Image (cartoon, rainbow, N blue to C red):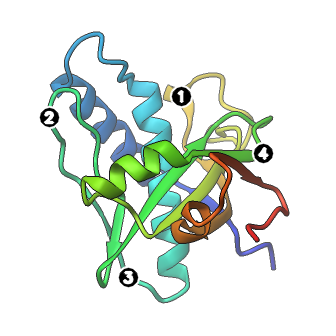
Amino acid sequence: MGNDNNIILGSGDIAEARAFAHDVVAQKAPGAGWTETGVFVGRLGEIAFRTFLREHGIGTELDGRIYGSTDGDATDIAYRGWWIDVKCTSDGRQHALYVSCDKLRGREQRGELSHYYAFVRLGHPRDAEGRPARSFGEAVEYPATICGWVDVRHILDDERRQRTLGGRSSVR
């Protein structure tokens, strides 16, 4: 039995993320900084965290709406009134989640503050033979690791302006 924080995303998950990324970027303003790869990676992270929650008996859905030409979403997953914002990286060297308290306070003032931040790291995609895929198009599997999550109140209560969470670190 493996680590239950490790998720394998299959071809259906990849297709869902790819379609969402394409639709989002098609509706965003040119030059606004939205890329299909960036949205794709983010969506795969959201799908991985949704899968993780479902495997633990928590049925959730992702926010599938596409917002204004320059706007992002307020939350990725809503469950019984709780909002979860999922951050994801495909950079295997990134082992920490950077959170800006200024950005959180701005979201709080707009009524868009999530209750939790979750951090997901994608592994290298694999092709149909189980080998590392040479391109996103060849990928039929993505390993993902749920690195952890944090209650946003712990971040905002901290006196420091910025904090890095990662690996085995904890918020005190």
Q: Quadrant of residue 9?
A: bottom right
Residue closest to the eye, 67 or 98: 98
Report the Cα–Cα distance between label 2 and label 3: 28 Å
Q: Is residue 140 shown to the viewer in this render?
A: yes
Q: Closer to the camera: disc 2 or disc 3?
A: 2
Q: Please say if 133 is above or below 121.
A: above
Callouts 3 and 1 close, C-beta under 8 Å:
no
Residue sticking out furthest to the right:
168
> SS class of the residue under badge 4?
loop
Which residue lies under the disc numbered 2?
68
Compare marks 2 and 1 and give the one earlier in the sequence: 2
Q: Please say if 144 is above or below 137.
A: below
Residue type, mark 4 in image: His
Which residue lies under the disc numbered 4?
95
From the viewer's perspective, tell me whether residue 123 is left or right of residue 88. right
Residue type, mark 2 in image: Gly
Compare marks 3 and 1 and give the one earlier in the sequence: 3
Q: Please say if 78 is above or below 138.
A: below
Report the Cα–Cα distance between label 2 and label 1: 27 Å
- Circle 2 packing at 10 Å, graded few (<14), some (14-19), many (20+), is few
Task: Give the image location of residue 21, x and y in percent.
Answer: 33, 34
Which residue lies under the disc numbered 1?
136
Q: Looking at the rendering, in which quadrant would you find the N terminus?
A: bottom right
Q: Is residue 122 shown to the viewer in this render?
A: no
Which residue lies under the disc numbered 3?
59
